[in-house]
Amino acid sequence: GGSEWTYTGQHGPLHWGSMFQSCAGNRQSPINIETLNVKQEYWKPLLLKNYEKAPSRMRVKNNGHSAQVEIDAAVAPRVTGGGLKGEYIFAQFHFHWGADSTLGSEHTIDGVRYPMELHMVHYKGSYGTLGEAVKRRDGLAVLGVMLEVSSNDNPALAPLATALLNVTDAEMYAEISAMYPLKAFLPRNIEKFYRYEGSLTTPTCNEVVTWTVFDEAISISERQLNNFRALLDSHGGRIVNNFRPPQPLNNRKVYVSAE
Ligand code: SG7
Ligand code: ZN
């Protein structure tokens, strides 16, 4: 359709601003985080509820731009504290990655790019649904996790990496055969994170996201990364380099949680 966007060419990130008004806004994501330019804040710890419980069901969707994981859980995982105002309910997580491991993350830290970035998307409970929350300034809280290459498979990513083989084409879904709690997809140290006010990193680029980017990365093997790189978009092209480049910081501050 006319609102189709891509990561390269005539409908790529440089053109999103003329296709979607919010993408030309002044609090866009991602950003380059300059660690010499962050302000320390002494927040209460980030509180993850039900993050240690294995969901009853997990499935992965190839949405044509990313691999997105949805869960069924008796009690929805939530995040609060850590300077967030209110409680945010887990909606889904997804990934951004490169064609090779020299690039792939959306946020960069002091200019360093990681081969992959995971986003845990949460919406503010008081807004009821994700659809309502994306219309509100403080609607979403996304937790960003960097991934770095290891020579070993990450066991928590293994059932997902296998399920990816069954969602090669856009709009396909597959069940994930073994459930890990969401906590297994986060770094051990969640105490040190960067925080700023930004946007969705894809069109329609709504400026509604309180971003939390953890300092510590988790691991993934090249073999596991290659399963993501084999996914196809709606035109049959490989989904790779599905990251938006860093956006101007403009009038914003970036904070770091005090350790
Ligand atoms: C992904 O990035 C999808 C989107 C997501 C978007 O391509 O997972 O999710 C859905 C439901 O389509 O948009 C509203 C939303 O979660 C942008 O999310 S991000 O800013 O965390 N990268
Ligand atoms: Zn994302």
Image (spheres, rainbow, N blue to C red):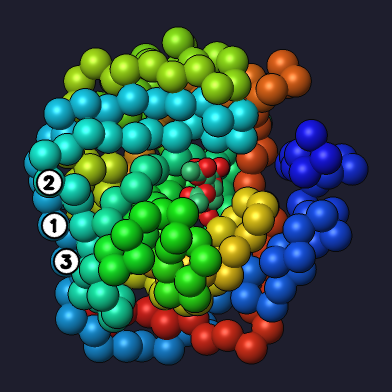
Q: What residue is rendered at 63% in x and 47% in y?
A: 243
Q: Return the residue at label 1.
A: 49
Front position in the image: 193 or 7: 7
In terms of secondary structure, where does tag 2 sit? loop
Front position in the image: 34 or 77: 77
Badge 3 amino acid: Leu
Cα separation, mark 1 vs mark 2, equals: 9 Å
Sequence-earlier tag: 3 or 2: 3
Sequence-earlier tag: 1 or 2: 1
Reply above or below: 19 against 182: below
Q: What residue is rendered at 79% in x and 34% in y?
A: 1
Question: Disc 1, disc 2: CB below 8 Å?
Answer: yes
Reply above or below: 37 against 49: below
Cα separation, mark 1 vs mark 3, equals: 6 Å
Q: Return the residue at label 3.
A: 47
Residue 170 at x, y percent in the picture: 59, 21
The answer to whether one can see residue 191 in this image is no
In terms of secondary structure, where does tag 1 sit? strand
Judged from this view, the residue extending furthest toward the right is 10
Residue 147 at x, y percent in the picture: 42, 44
The answer to whether one can see residue 120 in this image is yes
Quadrant for residue 224, please give it: top left
In terms of secondary structure, where does tag 3 sit? strand
